[in-house]
Image: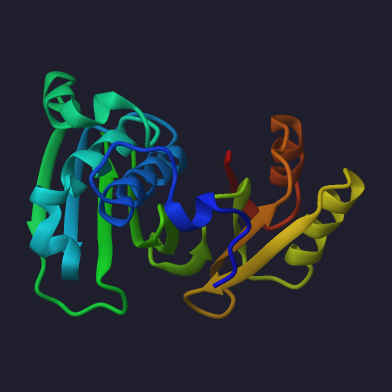
Amino acid sequence: MKYKSVFDIIGPVMIGPSSSHTAGAARIGRVARSLFGREPKWAKISFYGSFAKTYKGHGTDVAIVGGLLDFDTFDERIINSIEMANKLGINIEFIEEDAITDHPNTARIVIGDDHAELELVGISIGGGKIEITELNGFELKLSGHHPAILVVHNDRFGAIASVSNILAKYEINIGHMEVSRKEKGMLALMTIEVDQNIDESILKELETLDNIVKVTKIVD
């Protein structure tokens, strides 16, 4: 793994005790909140591997809930996030899973309200760094450390090129891009990490393209 700065090694400014189990968990929760776009009414949080064994002692539970409340890793409110969620009427359920996963620090978050649901799998890879590996059944690789757009689209010829052309028109550089689909010719997901935040007007322009179903952005 390549590190860009010393902060990638020692971790971010955060509420302790662990960059992997606390800061990483908070970031996973916050990415879920960002993708959902609003405060959820309920959350089911499943812990696997090391997370399942130590989440209470290492504050992984309060960290993920803090992320769902849109708290950053250094926000002292994380400590009381579960109580705050309860006061807001958010129903939180924690599940300790026995299944073996590819990474020991894995969490599956399912959140929702009366209108929609979102399911996300994230791993904490150390130093507060994370990867989102699954979103609503789509496999992906999203760091959560760079601005990104997620484009749900019909799996048709030219869809990827049309999105790339719009980004090129506005001189937006693509740092990483992946495409995932469940079945040929059905819905697919473009995951595009870029070098700068993208204006809402560009997102709306992307949504007008043929075969584009939904565009969501994650702000760094």
In the figure, is residue 18 to the left or right of 178? Answer: left
Relative vertical location of residue 155 with respect to residue 172 in this rendering, above or below? below
Relative vertical location of residue 213 with respect to residue 87 in this rendering, above or below? below
Where residue 74 sits: x, y (%)?
37, 32
Residue that sits furthest to the top in the current view: 87
* Among the 4 quarters of the image, the one containing residue 185: bottom right
Residue 48 visible in the snapshot = no
In the figure, is residue 16 to the left or right of 71? Answer: left
Looking at this view, is 59 or 66 the one in front? 59
Relative vertical location of residue 203 with respect to residue 144 in this rendering, above or below? above
Q: How is the image coloured?
A: rainbow
State the residue at coordinates (19%, 39%): 62
State the residue at coordinates (68%, 58%): 211
Where residue 37 sits: x, y (%)?
44, 34
Where residue 96 sits: x, y (%)?
8, 61
State the residue at coordinates (31%, 74%): 103
Looking at this view, is 161 or 74 the one in front? 74
Which quarter of the rendered picture does the N terminus lie within?
bottom right
Which quarter of the rendered picture does the C terminus lie within?
top right
In the figure, is residue 174 to the left or right of 136? Answer: right
State the residue at coordinates (69%, 31%): 200
Where residue 167 sits: x, y (%)?
82, 50
Relative vertical location of residue 81 with respect to residue 154 in this rendering, above or below? above
Looking at this view, is 218 or 126 the one in front? 126
Looking at this view, is 180 or 159 the one in front? 180
Residue 41 visible in the snapshot = yes
